Amino acid sequence: MKSKASRFSWCEKACRGIVLPSERRKAQKELEGHMEDKIDDFMTMGMDFGQALTAAERAMGDPVQTAEMFSRIYPRFASWVFIFARSLFMSTAVFFFVYFFSLGYFDRNDLFSSLAENAAEVIEIDGHNGFERAGYRFSAERAAVTDDGTLILEIKVSGPIWFASPDGAAEMLKFRSAGGQKLESRFEGKTRSLFCPRYCFAIDIKEESLPVEISYDFGQASESFKVGE
């Protein structure tokens, strides 16, 4: 006598030709309903469960042939394309979530404010147009002067974020005073933001008198502005 655990093994084998899990479950549930009806019919004729199950499986035919029929009804190629497209969509959604989270979309860290927390003066930079170089766009956003003669400068850098990171470009910026004298600077890091990171530099201007005109360049492109006015 066959156990109840093997009752629907025939239905499972018959549905192996269906690739999509949702369609496979639907077809298997329908076949199981037919199997139960046939088992009930044979048991009303006096058979025990094992005999009724064997007779029902014989009446429903070869499960391999049924699987081949299902594979024609539910084309494998179309099913795999659907599964691939769905997996690609889910992977893309996960990628965007992780990417935006890593940029600080949910938790922005304002590096400039932390560096300029005890600044003697915070200056909003107006009238700057920025410049473009090597596919990147640079523009000075904010500046603050500390008591020890250090200028904290925030520069927004936007570029081809899908192909390259602007980090290296930001670190190659050079700073000069109005007279062309090179100013000592150090790269402090970046403020995380969506698509357009803001990079902070600490620039030594203690030898300069305010207001001071600062120019910064990357390659042959440059921009100038005044701070401390």
Image (spheres, rainbow, N blue to C red):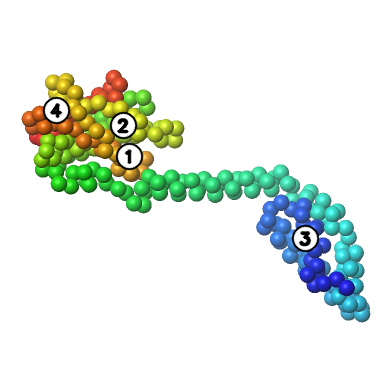
Q: Quadrant of the N terminus?
A: bottom right
Q: Earlier in the sequence, mark 4 or mark 3?
A: 3
Residue denoted by label 1: 197
CB atoms of marks 4 and 3 within 8 Å: no
> Which SS class for mark 1?
loop
**How far is mark 1 from mark 4, CA to CA?**
24 Å
Provide residue 102's location: percent of width, then percent of height. 40, 46
Q: CA distance from mark 4 to mark 3?
A: 78 Å
Residue at 34% from the left image edge and 51% from the top image edge? 107
Tell me the distance, in whole angstroms, between the alpha carbons under discs 2 and 1.
10 Å
Q: Earlier in the sequence, mark 3 or mark 2?
A: 3
User: Mark 3 — residue?
Assistant: 12
Q: Are marks 1 and 3 in contact (CB under 8 Å)?
A: no
Left or right of 142: which side holds 24? right
Other residues around mark 2 within 10 Å, as few (<14) / some (14–19) / many (≥20): many
Task: Look at label 3 and name its amino acid.
Answer: Glu
Give the mark nearer the N terminus: 1 vs 4. Answer: 1
Can residue 131 be seen at all in this image of the molecule? no
Task: State yes or no: discs 2 and 1 in contact (Cβ < 8 Å).
Answer: yes
Label 3 secondary element:
helix
Image quadrant where residue 207 sits: top left
User: What's the mark number on residue 213?
Assistant: 4
Circle nearer the N terminus (1, 3): 3
Q: Secondary structure at mark 4?
A: strand
Is tag 2's residue or tag 4's residue first in the polypeptide sequence? 2
